[in-house]
């Protein structure tokens, strides 16, 4: 009788605590953690050891990525590490608890799909194990990129954009300056009149400008993502770069040439047709010179197209 009772208890427990099949809504409502970091202040050294530059700005967030992780495989899938933070003015340290990431990101430029490491966490699987190879419809796999979203803008910068009056396809290289932060509304203070024993009418909301840049940001893009090898023996390479103002019309600022001496760690940068002096690559890895040098001389898989016309 005791054995029979024990079997009944085990069967009941097994039926209620065994693996369960999850639907899409239950999966996306799971609280997830970064597979790399938990709270940025506790891992500040991990952030400081990397190089982060501004990649894109959405309505409420700034997207940063490590340009030294940018690679593309033979199937035209781009991978890179990125994090985002609130686009607001505050007194917090550069790397603080408001940061989300960094996560490994992948973009399939051909099929317009995006994959993020965000939901690939041990926490998610442990708290709600999936049965077999069942995966949610959306969230932990390749997701179709929706137009006019932040990730769509990121895709256009990394996969290349084409202007109406230009036959070239430009690929993002660097941005100098930030857009103005969004306007915040200062909440009115409630006032209670004790003598009249009533609530006073609230004043109108006061608009407060969080920040305002002194000049329009400028961004630089590599034309057609091509590297021209000028001197194969000395490994001297050339990138053609265009710059635009980050305004409503994307007004063009100018065309430039970036030369990189990969052996001697030197670069030159200036307008097309104007000779420039060679200078040492800056030690700051998140500077324009260092990022440009890495794009020309670094290993990015098939992301950069090598052109050997006129090689000496």
Image (cartoon, grey):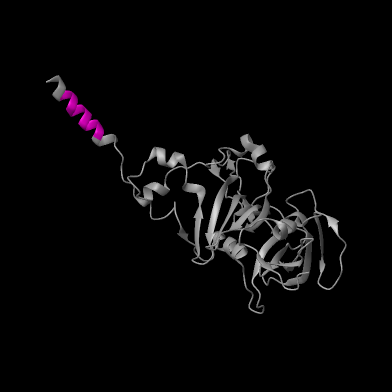
Query: Total label count?
Result: 0
Looking at the magenta stretch, what is its main secondary structure?
Answer: helix
Query: Who's the residue at 67% across and 37% down the image?
Result: 45
Q: In this view, does 74 lie to the left or right of 173?
A: left
Relative image position of residue 286 (x, y in whole percent): 73, 51
Q: Quadrant of residue 78?
A: bottom right
Relative image position of residue 122 (x, y in whole percent): 45, 40
Residue situated furthest bottom in the rendering: 165
Q: Is residue 177 visible?
A: no
User: What residue span does the magenta drawing correspond to?
Assistant: 5-14
Q: Quadrant of the C terminus?
A: bottom right
Q: In this view, does 241 lie to the left or right of 99?
A: right
Relative image position of residue 198 (x, y in whole percent): 54, 43
**Residue 94 in the image: above or below residue 302:** above
Q: Is residue 221 visible?
A: yes
Q: Quadrant of the N terminus?
A: top left
Query: Who's the residue at 45% across and 39% down the image?
Result: 123
Q: In this view, does 209 lie to the left or right of 196?
A: right
Camera-nearest residue between 110 and 58: 110
Camera-nearest residue between 62 and 276: 276
In the image, residue 13 lies in the stretch drawn in magenta: yes
Residue situated furthest left in the rendering: 1
In the image, residue 47 lies in the stretch drawn in magenta: no
Relative image position of residue 137 (x, y in whole percent): 38, 55
Query: Who's the residue at 50% across and 58% down the image?
Result: 114
Camera-nearest residue between 261 and 241: 261
């Amino acid at each position: 009788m005791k054995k029979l009772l024990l079997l009944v208890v085990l069967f009941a427990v097994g039926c209620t605590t065994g693996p369960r099949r999850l639907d899409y809504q239950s999966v996306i409502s799971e609280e997830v953690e970064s597979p790399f970091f938990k709270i940025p202040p506790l891992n500040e050294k991990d952030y400081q050891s990397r190089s982060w530059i501004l990649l894109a700005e959405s309505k409420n967030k700034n997207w940063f990525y490590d340009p030294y992780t940018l690679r593309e495989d033979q199937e035209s899938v781009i991978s890179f590490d990125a994090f985002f933070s609130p686009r607001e003015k505050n007194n917090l340290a550069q790397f603080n608890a408001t940061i989300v990431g960094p996560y490994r990101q992948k973009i399939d430029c051909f099929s317009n799909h995006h994959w993020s490491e965000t939901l690939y966490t041990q926490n998610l699987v442990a708290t709600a194990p999936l049965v077999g190879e069942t995966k949610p419809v959306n969230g932990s796999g390749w997701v179709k990129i929706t137009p006019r979203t932040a990730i769509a803008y990121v895709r256009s910068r990394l996969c290349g954009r084409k202007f109406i009056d230009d036959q070239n396809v430009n690929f993002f290289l660097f941005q100098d300056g930030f857009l103005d932060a969004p306007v915040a509304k200062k909440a009115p203070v409630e006032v209670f009149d004790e003598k009249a024993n009533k609530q006073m009418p609230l004043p109108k909301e006061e608009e407060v400008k969080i920040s305002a840049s002194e000049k329009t940001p400028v961004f630089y893009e590599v034309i057609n993502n091509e590297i021209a090898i000028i001197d194969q023996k000395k490994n001297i390479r050339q990138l053609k770069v265009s710059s635009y103002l980050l305004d409503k019309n994307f007004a063009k600022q100018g065309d430039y040439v970036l030369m990189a001496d990969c052996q001697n760690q030197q670069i030159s940068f200036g307008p097309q047709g104007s000779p420039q002096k060679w200078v040492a690559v800056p030690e700051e890895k998140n500077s324009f010179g260092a990022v440009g040098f890495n794009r020309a001389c670094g290993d990015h898989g098939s992301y950069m197209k090598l052109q050997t016309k006129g090689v000496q």
